[in-house]
Amino acid sequence: MSFPTSRVTLHTPTDLLAAVPYLLGFHPADSVVVVGLAGTRVVFTARADLPTSQAPPDEALALADQLGEVLAGQRVDIALIIGYGEAATVTRTVFALRDALRGYGVAVGEMLRADGARYWSYLCQSVRCCPAEGTPYDVAGTEVAAAATYAGRVALPDRAALERSLTPTEGAEREAMERATERAARALTSELGEEAEQAGRGAPGDPAGGGEDDPGDGGEDDPGDRDGPVRDRRRAGARALTLAVRRYADGGRLTDDEVARLALLLVRIDVRDLCWARITVAGDQLEAHLRLWRDVTRRARADLVAAPATLFGYTAWRSGDGALAWIAVQRALDSNPAYSLALLLGEALDRALPPSLLDEQPADQRRRRRRRGRPTRTG
């Protein structure tokens, strides 16, 4: 089978165990992981916490059925199951998942238990390659780990470390961003008018404050698109985005004032949608978008985090990093629980839908829903 980022072939259980942390973005523990293959290519990876050994059997069965349904929806041919932890917690969940997958018509190609030093195969009966005491393994020196690292993939120690990679800045850095946001709000007010000043204050009715209405959302059939302030705002957003992507592609970083300006512009839905569209067609610049939106999410003022965090989640999702996308969605919703583009992204992740289903710009989705007479929610 082949590893998607670098097209490295996985020949052995050790290769598979080496690939999983890079597929997830962190080293799993007390977890069940299922890797889906289409032909010989890895196309889907899911992870869940293992039920404890004291949990009722129904909990393992329910988890297995949920994972089985998700994997079957990805149209995979073969599933590989790995349980990380002690046999008492791993075995029943792994076998329940095997049965669930078979019920959904998905073949199971391997079932492993790993404890960080040794692995055991539930399918292999040969004592020569799968002894009762387990097979020692070391993922650090594998070709898979080297290729993933070279391709820019990171495997953090655990999921908590992945969450910390998106935590807000603190102390003097946070205070500097507060001052930069005030300066950027005044500058944008001078350039674009009163609405920038309102955005800087987190005005009621503004999308940053949970409002859904955005006069002139930038759609091609929206009269507001021909209005001077709206046009100027979109141009300012496009310039800020182009500068930012180029800066991170070159290994640089935005200044506090540049982060503040971009975060304030993102309050308006038309600018945010423009950034969403650029991510959709980013191609080989996707890594630069990841660095950009992670940095803006961490540094932006608390009331301005929802938009950049959602954009970061979308970028992570398109990069194949579902775990990081989930963390970004939660950051967005912590900032604004009613931010409906984050809710939409979270729903797509929960249902394990392919990113291509959200290729359409949110503004186009709103117009299509209006034509169908449906309520519109894209904050």
Image (spheres, helix red, strand yellow):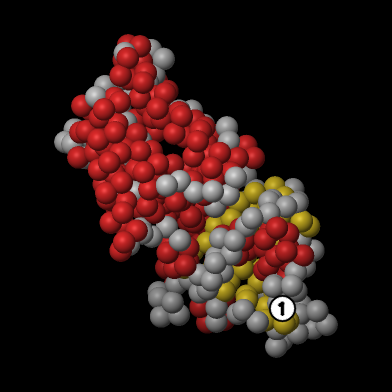
Along the line of sight, which residue is nearer the eye, 341 or 190? 190
| Element assignment for label 1 | loop
Point out residue 126 in the picture as x, y percentages from the top left corner.
80, 79
Q: Which residue is mark 1?
A: 137
Residue 234 placement: quadrant: top left
Graded by Cα atoms within 10 Å as few (under 14), some (14 to 19) or many (20 or more), the crowding at tag 1 reads some
Q: Is the N terminus in the top left, top right, bottom left or bottom right quadrant?
A: bottom right
Q: Is the C terminus in the top left, top right, bottom left or bottom right quadrant?
A: top left
Along the line of sight, which residue is nearer the eye, 207 or 114? 207
Q: Residue at x 70, y 47 (%)?
A: 38
Give the residue at the far left of this rendering. 204
Point out residue 353 in the picture as x, y percentages from the top left corner.
51, 42
Give the residue at the far right of this rendering. 128
Point out residue 242 in the picture as x, y percentages from the top left corner.
51, 33
Q: What amino acid does circle 1 point to?
A: Tyr
Point out residue 134 in the picture as x, y percentages from the top left corner.
70, 83
Give the residue at the far bottom of this rendering. 133
